[in-house]
Structures are given as C-alpha cells and as structure tokens.
Image (cartoon, helix red, strand yellow):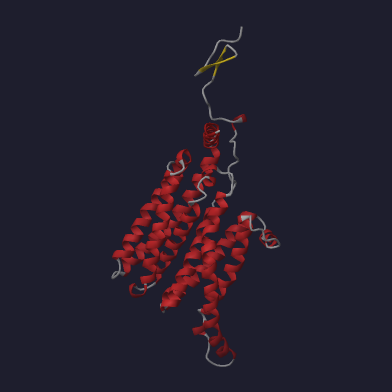
C-alpha cells in the first residue's frame, strides 16, 4: 500500500487516491527563481538624471520659443549637468569607461540598451552646445570673440532643438529597458513604465523652471508641471492597480513608501505651481517638490522591481494563472 495521504485537496487517478500538497512558493536551495538585478543606487540615480535632462531641454526650448531667457538658460544648463551626471552613473555601473564607447560600435534597434546609448550620444553633445551658447553674452565684442559672440546664439538655438527632439526618447527608453528584463513587476508593467517616466521627466523639468524663473516668466513651467504630473500619476496608479499580484511590490516596503511620497510631492508641486503665480517662494517650493517627486518615483519603481525578483511567488503565481487561462481557452 502507498503512504497515507497528506496535505490539501484530493483527487483520483486510475482508482488510486492522490494527495496534493499545499503550495509553497520556494525554489531550489531557497534561491529566487529570477535572479534579482545586481544594480546599485547608481542605476535609479541614472534613471532620474536622464529624465531631468530630457525635461529640462524641453523647458529650454519652451523658454526659447516664448522669449523667456531665464527659462531657456536654466533649462539648458540643467540639461547639460543632468546628462553629464547620467554618463557618470552609467559608466560607474559599467565599471570601465571604454565599455560605453564599445557600445557605439553597433546599432541594434531591438536592444533598448543599444538604442539608449545612441540617444545619449546624440542628446549629450547637443545639450552641451546649447549650454555653451549661453556664454555668448559674456564674450568680448572685439576681435575673434566678436565672431563667436555672433555665431553662438543661432548655433545654440539649433542644438537646443536637436536636444528637445531627442528628449522624449531619452525620457522613455529607460522604462522600455526595465520592462525588457525578466524582472516580474517591471516586465508586466511594459505599457505603463514609459508613461510614468515621461511624466516624471516633464514634471522635474517644470520644477527646474519654477525654481529658477521669476513668476512672470514661469508660465510654460506651470503648464509643463500639470501635463507631467497628470501622466505620472495616471501611469503610477495603473502600475499599482492593473498588474494584480505583481502590483503588490509597488505598494509595500521601501517601494511603497517611496511611491506614496512621490505622489504626495507631485500633488504639492502642482498645487503650488497653480496657486503660486504671484509668490516667488511658493513657486520655488513647488518646483523643489516636483524634482523630489521625480527622485522618489524613479527609486520606488526600481525597488519594486527588485523586490518582485527576490520573492518566488511573483514568478510562480502569474505563470500558473497564464497556464490556467490557456487551458481554459483550449
């Protein structure tokens, strides 16, 4: 005779009673089924600075088109500083600077990492030229400097447009990059992550404008803040509600606290942007809140994905649910 049945439900196979043990979401030797990312703090920092650079370049073009020199200057300088910081964080993660150069030897449209490398290679120099053009007014008005003083502004305007056209790709490709991994809560959120990152980039760029510009010149920054916050909040809400079990890592632990803080700071920033039309202090506080919200959102998304890779249930349960749906449909 076979062993006495133990565990949960019972069934019959060939007249013999079969025991089904209770489900335990573990893997061999207690190791996760999906290997958690080995990325450290520099990658979420890279996600933030890339978005900040993209949003700031769009702010700069807005200031350029509407004749607001303070917005234009702040956007260009912050875009250059942020994309420079992005390069530092990326090279730090890669370990050796030449690895970034080696990635430029190939262009593979099916690889988000390859596409992102080329986006940075186009955006970075354009942002640099646009920022350098801001020094034109400081140059002497005689000799060779006079020629540079006349040439830099139009060159800067062209470079600013190149950076702004590249900015949407820079803002969103990192969301595609995360969703292209096997990390459960990133992979399943592939429609939402680019939207969240685009909104976060716009909101952080708006924050730069609200911090830098007098209230009379901050109109485009306020409109950018509203558009960015709407995209970010809608996308983040879907991430935290649409994915079923895979939404859980975004609601609990470090990720949950960071994303809740991000939502609160975004709300404060938008309200301050709308109500602070005549107050320089309120406008600056709302700008700082929007930038801080972008930091919290990027780090929250990062920690949520890492948490989902470390717990086997976020791999096993969705797989079983998909198999059950296929069996029911077949």
Question: Where's residue 298, x and y in %?
Answer: 48, 53
Question: Where's residue 265, x and y in %?
Answer: 37, 55
At x 56% / y 30%, what residue is drawn?
Answer: 26
Question: Where's residue 259, x and y in %?
Answer: 42, 49
For the residue pair 174 and 209, the one nearer the viewer reads as 174
In the picture, which quadrant includes the C terminus? top right
Horizontally, residue 220 falls left or right of residue 189, namely left
For the residue pair 258 and 234, the one nearer the viewer reads as 234
Q: Judge whether 181 appears above or below 68 on screen.
A: above
Answer with the quarter of the image where residue 150 lies: bottom right
Q: Judge whether 311 appears above or below 63 on screen.
A: above
Residue 80 appears in the picture as rendered:
no
Q: Judge whether 15 appears above or below 237 on screen.
A: above
For the residue pair 183 and 299, the one nearer the viewer reads as 183
At x 50% / y 65%, what residue is drawn?
Answer: 54
Residue 56 appears in the picture as rendered:
yes
Question: Where's residue 114, x and y in %?
Answer: 64, 58
Residue occupying the far front of the picture: 330
In the picture, which quadrant includes the N terminus? top right
How many numbered discs? Answer: 0
At x 55% / y 75%, what residue is drawn?
Answer: 159
Q: Judge whether 312 appears above or below 104 on screen.
A: above
Residue occupying the far top of the picture: 1
């Amino acid at each position: 005779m076979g062993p006495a049945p133990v565990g949960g439900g019972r069934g019959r196979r060939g007249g013999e009673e079969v025991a089904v043990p209770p489900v335990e979401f573990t893997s061999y030797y207690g190791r996760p089924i999906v290997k958690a990312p080995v990325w450290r703090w520099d990658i979420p920092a890279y996600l933030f600075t890339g978005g900040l650079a993209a949003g700031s370049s769009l702010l700069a073009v807005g200031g350029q088109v509407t004749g607001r020199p303070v917005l234009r200057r702040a956007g260009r300088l912050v875009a250059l500083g942020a994309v420079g910081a992005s390069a530092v964080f990326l090279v730090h993660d890669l370990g050796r600077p030449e690895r970034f150069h080696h990635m430029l030897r190939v262009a593979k449209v099916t690889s988000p990492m390859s596409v992102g490398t080329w986006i940075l290679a186009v955006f970075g120099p354009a942002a640099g030229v646009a920022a350098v053009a801001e020094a034109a007014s400081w140059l002497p008005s005689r000799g060779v400097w006079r020629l540079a003083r006349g040439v830099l502004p139009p060159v800067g305007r062209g470079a600013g447009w190149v950076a702004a056209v590249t900015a949407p790709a820079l803002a969103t490709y990192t969301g595609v990059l995360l969703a292209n991994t096997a990390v459960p809560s990133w992979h399943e959120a592939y429609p939402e992550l680019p939207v969240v990152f685009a909104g976060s980039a716009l909101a952080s760029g708006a924050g730069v404008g609200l911090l830098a510009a007098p209230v009379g010149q901050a109109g485009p920054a306020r409109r950018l803040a509203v558009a960015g916050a709407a995209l970010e909040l809608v996308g983040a809400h879907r991430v935290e509600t649409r994915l079923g079990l895979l939404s859980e890592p975004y609601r609990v632990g470090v990720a949950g606290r960071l994303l809740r803080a991000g939502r609160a700071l975004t709300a404060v920033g938008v309200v301050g942007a709308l109500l602070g039309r005549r107050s320089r202090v309120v406008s600056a506080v709302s700008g700082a809140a929007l930038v801080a919200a972008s930091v919290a959102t990027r780090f929250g998304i990062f920690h949520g994905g890492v948490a989902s890779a470390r717990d086997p249930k976020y791999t096993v349960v969705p797989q079983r649910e998909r198999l059950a749906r296929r069996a029911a449909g077949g």
